[in-house]
């Protein structure tokens, strides 16, 4: 009998004020207003939380408050653009606050708790890398072939200012991403089984090939590289690096103890890729027989 009475009291305490609303705020502004009834389990109405509904709700809140961090960069004029911190939802603290509300142990308002998220590359790191050039390569293209030149420009922008940390493997496909119309890539000539045909993103292999030659001069470990099925004009024979989203990739590993900074630029009809590192970077001398 005593256990039955205690259970009744607990249930009664849990369902009181079941109609009071919960307000979710972020920086003083209301993101959502919900009620306990929106999250009660259909089996134990008003007593247990429907976990699936709560997770869906938390996902929506997370989408609203998440801000991705932005790396520090060097602009085309050589000026440093500082990094920006990001934010992400502290799901654990948010869930704890929600359960406290649901079981009536807290106020009816939650200010969204967040974590600070930090960028990969901050100003201090860039400043330490920008002065010592350790590799460079230049290739040339027809700037009047507008669609191909446009694709080259997009790929150059994608790899520019990328920092490859010690032990990290750089993947051209991963960094540049899928070359799609939605991302702005245009049809231009590509090589397929030795033949020229139009394909979305045609021309970006000149960027991957220029990058290959630049980092090869640094002495990194080339992890993956494939040549085209026919000769290309912008690099000497055997010095190209073909890439395709569903096919070959160009990868290299930074086998040094210092980070490497990729600086990629277009000047007229030329692709210039320079590799920088810290003042303490030392490239091993080639052995002579």
Image: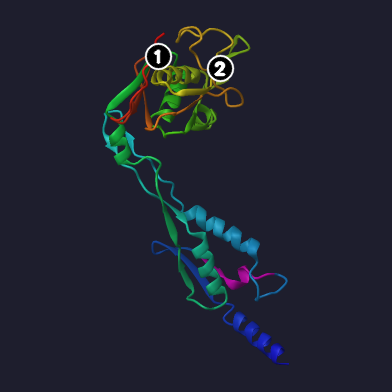
Magenta span includes 37: yes
10 or 187: nearer the viewer: 10
Q: Residue at x 63, y 69 (%)?
A: 49
Q: Which residue is mark 1?
A: 287
Q: Is residue 289 left or right of residue 34?
A: left
Q: State the residue in front, 206 or 223.
A: 223
Q: Nearer the viewer, residue 171 or 128?
A: 128
Q: State how far apart marks 1 and 2 are (Cα).
A: 26 Å
Q: Is residue 49 magenta?
A: no
Of the two numbered discs 1 and 2 on the same chain, state the one appearing first in sequence. Answer: 2
Query: Where residue 140 sits: x, y (%)?
Result: 40, 12
Q: Residue at x 65, y 71 (%)?
A: 40
Q: Position of residue 240 (x, y in %)?
A: 50, 14
In front: 87, or 37?
Answer: 87
Looking at the rendered image, the quarter that the N terminus falls into is bottom right
Query: What range is drawn magenta here?
Result: 32-41
Q: Is residue 221 visible?
A: yes
- Residue placed under numbered mark 2 in the picture: 226
> Which colour assignment does the render follow?
rainbow
Q: Is residue 32 visible?
A: no
Q: Quadrant of the C terminus?
A: top left
Q: Which SS class for mark 2?
A: loop
Q: Nearer the viewer, mark 1 or mark 2?
A: 1
Could you tell me which residue is drawn at 55 percent across and 30 percent down? 178
Residue lying furthest front: 289
């Amino acid at each position: 009998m005593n256990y039955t009475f205690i259970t009744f009291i607990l249930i009664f305490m849990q369902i009181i004020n079941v109609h009071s609303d919960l307000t979710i705020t972020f920086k003083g502004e209301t993101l959502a207003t919900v009620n306990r009834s929106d999250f009660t389990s259909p089996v134990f109405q008003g007593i247990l939380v429907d976990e699936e509904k709560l997770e869906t709700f938390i996902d929506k809140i997370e989408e609203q408050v998440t801000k991705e961090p932005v790396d520090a960069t060097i602009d085309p004029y050589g000026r440093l653009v500082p990094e920006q911190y990001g934010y992400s939802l502290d799901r654990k603290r948010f869930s704890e606050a929600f359960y406290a509300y649901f079981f009536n142990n807290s106020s009816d308002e939650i200010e969204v708790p967040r974590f600070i998220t930090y960028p990969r590359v901050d100003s201090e790191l860039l400043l330490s890398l920008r002065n010592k050039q350790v590799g460079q390569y230049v290739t040339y293209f027809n700037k009047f072939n507008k669609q191909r030149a446009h694709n080259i420009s997009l790929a150059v922008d994608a790899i520019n200012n990328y920092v490859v940390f010690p032990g990290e493997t750089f993947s051209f496909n991963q960094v540049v991403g899928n070359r799609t119309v939605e991302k702005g890539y245009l049809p231009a000539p590509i090589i397929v089984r030795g033949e020229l045909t139009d394909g979305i993103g045609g021309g970006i292999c000149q960027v991957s090939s220029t990058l290959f030659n630049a980092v090869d001069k640094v002495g990194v470990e080339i992890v993956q590289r494939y040549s085209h099925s026919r000769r290309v004009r912008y690099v000497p024979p055997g010095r190209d690096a073909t890439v395709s989203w569903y096919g070959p990739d160009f990868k290299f590993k930074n086998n040094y103890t210092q980070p490497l900074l990729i600086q990629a630029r277009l000047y007229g009809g030329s692709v210039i890729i320079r590799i920088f590192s810290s003042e303490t970077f030392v490239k091993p001398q080639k052995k002579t027989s």
